Amino acid sequence: MFTASATQVQQLITILTQLAVLGSPPALASSAPAPSLLRPISEPRVRTPKHYVGDPEGCNQFLENFSILFALQTHTLSSEEAKVAFTISHLMGRAWQVGEMHACL
């Protein structure tokens, strides 16, 4: 059971690291106002995922919930930095300590 926990925590670390490394998308070259300024953006309402404390049984569900959230909330979570910060804010206990340590790399 310890191996599964370590593997799942490592998967979470890998995903968080990849999100942090990707950086933000390039700025638009146009000087025209962004479409979001012209009309409000309507995104589907998604239940906020539960906090993850590092238990191996909940890791896959936690990651799947965030994948769905990121796919549906493309405006609210438009940058990789926002995704990383939002994900880390939903970590608790041992998972938070590991996520916080790797987000600083």
Image: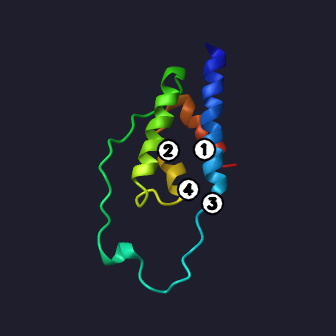
**Quadrant of the rendered image containing residue 94:** top right
Q: Earlier in the sequence, mark 1 or mark 3?
A: 1
Mark 2: amino acid: Thr
Q: Which residue is mark 2?
A: 87
Spatial separation of the CA atoms under disc 1 and disc 2: 8 Å
Instruction: Name the residue: 41% across, 61% down.
Output: 75
Give the residue type at disc 1: Leu
Which residue matches tag 4?
Answer: 80
Q: Earlier in the sequence, mark 4 or mark 3?
A: 3
Q: Residue at x 51, y 84 (%)?
A: 30
Q: Do callouts 1 and 2 mark residues in contact (Cβ within 8 Å)?
A: yes
Label 4 crowd bin: few (<14), some (14–19), many (20+), radius 10 Å: some
| Residue linked to disc 3 | 23
- Do the residues under discs 4 and 3 have CB atoms within 8 angstroms? yes
Q: Quadrant of residue 6?
A: top right
Position of residue 79 in the picture relative to residue 38 (left or right): right
Q: Nearer the viewer, mark 2 or mark 3?
A: 3
Which numbered dot is residue 16? Answer: 1
Tell me residue 88's x, y (percent).
52, 43
How packed is label 2: few (under 14 Cα within 10 Å), some, or many (20 or more)?
some
Kind of element beneath mark 3: loop
Q: Residues within 10 Å of mark 3 (few under 14, many from 20)?
A: few
